[in-house]
Image (cartoon, helix red, strand yellow):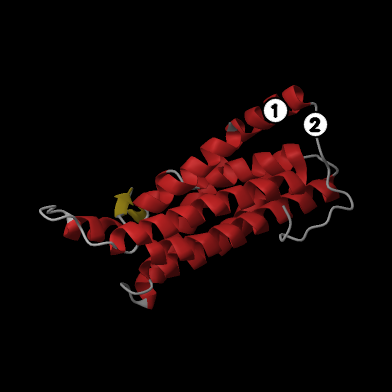
Amino acid sequence: MLLSVFTSVLLISNIVAPKMIEVFGFKISGALLLFPVTYIFGDIFTEVYGYAGSRRAIWSGFLGLGLYAVVTATVVALPPATGWPNQAAYETVLGSAPRIAIGSLIAYWAGEFANSFVMSRMKVSSDGRNLWQRTIGSTVVGQLVDTVIVVFAVFGTSLDFAGIAEIVRNQYIFKVLYEAAATPVTYWAVNTLKRAEGLDIIDKGVDYTPFKV
């Protein structure tokens, strides 16, 4: 169930990513309304099921995003049926989806694995104490990696460097604050799952290569 919601959030975030919105004076991508939730899921996966469990979840999400990129690119490229008047509008909304999806794939992969690695290593070093430090600390690293890559992928051809830097700054601050505000929810989810699953894995001696399933 968690994996299904996790993948759905990834796909929805990619669809709404190109639109810029303004929240309390900050210009952010529409994806920011939902995408930071994936890092909360990443923290939960790593905390409860360990790095290996999180790695499986990350690859599952990666495959879902890959399918989205291929199908979207194919449908946009195919000629519209005679009399269908919405091709231009469709291309406006989804025409950049292949580039965005490829950039998002790279950003998602790199950011999620950075988040999971930091979360896991901090849990080992703290012997499972201070969950809030791990969730926020891993987000600081993982979201920085993700934000820089995805913003360049989405806006690299339409904005100058100053505009991109502003979006990176705003999105990064928003994501970290989002994660910090969600800490009570993360605590509740982690503790509930640990009781239900009977698991609390500390990754001592784990293989941290991301290239395994």
Residue 189 placement, left or right of 165:
right
Look at the numbered discs 2 and 1 and tell me whether their residues touch, using CB distance below 8 Å: yes
* Residue 193, label in figure: 1
Closer-to-camera residue (43/183): 43
x, y percentage for residue 83? 10, 53
**In the picture, residue 132 is in which quadrant?**
top right
Q: Which residue is drawn at 37% across and 51% down?
A: 15
* Residue 199, label in figure: 2
Q: Residue at x 63, y 52 (%)?
A: 59
The vertical placement of 41 against 198, above or below, is: below
Packing grade of label 1 (10 A; few <14, some 14-19, many >=20) is some
x, y percentage for residue 102? 47, 65
Closer-to-camera residue (152/137): 152
**In the picture, residue 74 is in which quadrant?**
bottom left
User: Is any atom of residue 7 visible in this view?
Assistant: yes
x, y percentage for residue 19? 30, 55
